[in-house]
Amino acid sequence: MISKPLLKATTKQNYIVFLVILAVLMFYLPIIIGMYDPESQESFNEMLKMLPAQLIAAMGFSGAGSTLLSFIATYFYGFLILLLPMIYAVIVSNRSVASHVDKGSMAYLLSTPNTRSKIARTQALYLLVSITLLIGFITLIGIVMCQIMFPGILDVKGFLLLNVGALLLYYSLTGIGFFASCFFNDTKNSLAIGAGLPVAFLIFQMISDTGDATDFLKYFSLFTLFDPTKIISGEGYVPAFIALAVIAVVMYTAGTYAFHKRDLPL
């Protein structure tokens, strides 16, 4: 089904990037949790109002509620969770297939008893498992830090749903990157799609949040399907979760098929 030596090599190639992104996320999350203080929340919101309203909206920092979960959802899941794991997703997705073709190492891989489908499945598995571990560690750290700083206050179910949504979002984004990596022979074109689309999605999402005049741009962003406000309220998130899961399945399947069928410059 998969190539264990290739999976091991891919892990070795990407673990530094994984650890760096994880470390940055683990640095910011406890800080944001520690900033929560229901008694001074109003003062904190007033301080934010000193900044340009468009900037606050673009960063996803508007509409923070009074609960610990809504505070985390606004100040961590409103922007940071969209940006930092995306960097990891873009880098690793590009490295999965296109980088090997571009560097010529794909010829070596195919000279071993590995079929194209087996190589694609192995790289897809690494992407899915690694992004699951990344979000999983953040989920665990978030719950632990909340229990240490604010025992019994966190809505654990809502927090878990937030992370399920983030995970499905990144399944979709890595799926797009994986498809681009499988479809193109060089990293330039692979990155143009695998990195260009997620960055465009993020920009469209940020601009759409700045006002009614640009609200239509949210329909051009995959990030619209990850709405922390709807998730923590428990309303309207199921169709978005299903859509993200379908996109991920389609992209990974199409990527594997494209790599299996296309001509390679070996």
Image (spheres, grey):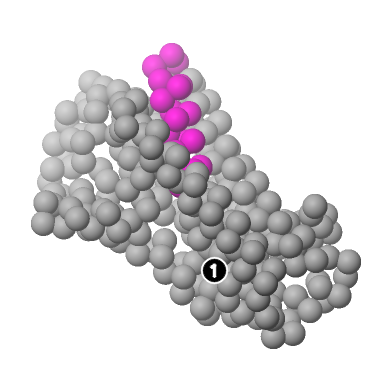
Which is more toward the observer, 141 or 9?
9
Give the x, y percent position of residue 130: 63, 49
Question: In the image, what residue occupies the spot 19% across and 55% down?
Answer: 216
Q: Which region of the structure is painted magenta?
A: 151-170
What is the count of numbered marks? 1
Which is more toward the observer, 256 or 19?
256
Question: In the image, what residue occupies the spot 43% across and 14% down?
Answer: 152
Q: Is residue 168 magenta?
A: yes
Q: Is residue 194 magenta?
A: no
| Label 1: which secondary element | helix
Q: Quadrant of residue 181?
A: bottom right
Give the x, y percent position of residue 217: 23, 58
Q: Which residue is mark 1?
A: 180
Query: Which SS type dominates the magenta stretch?
Result: helix
Residue 263 visible somewhere in the drawing = yes
Please indicate whether residue 167 sits to the left or right of residue 227 in the image: right
Please indicate whether residue 197 sits to the left or right of residue 130 in the image: left
148 shown above or below 225: above
Q: Amino acid at mark 1?
A: Ala
Residue 31 visible somewhere in the drawing = no
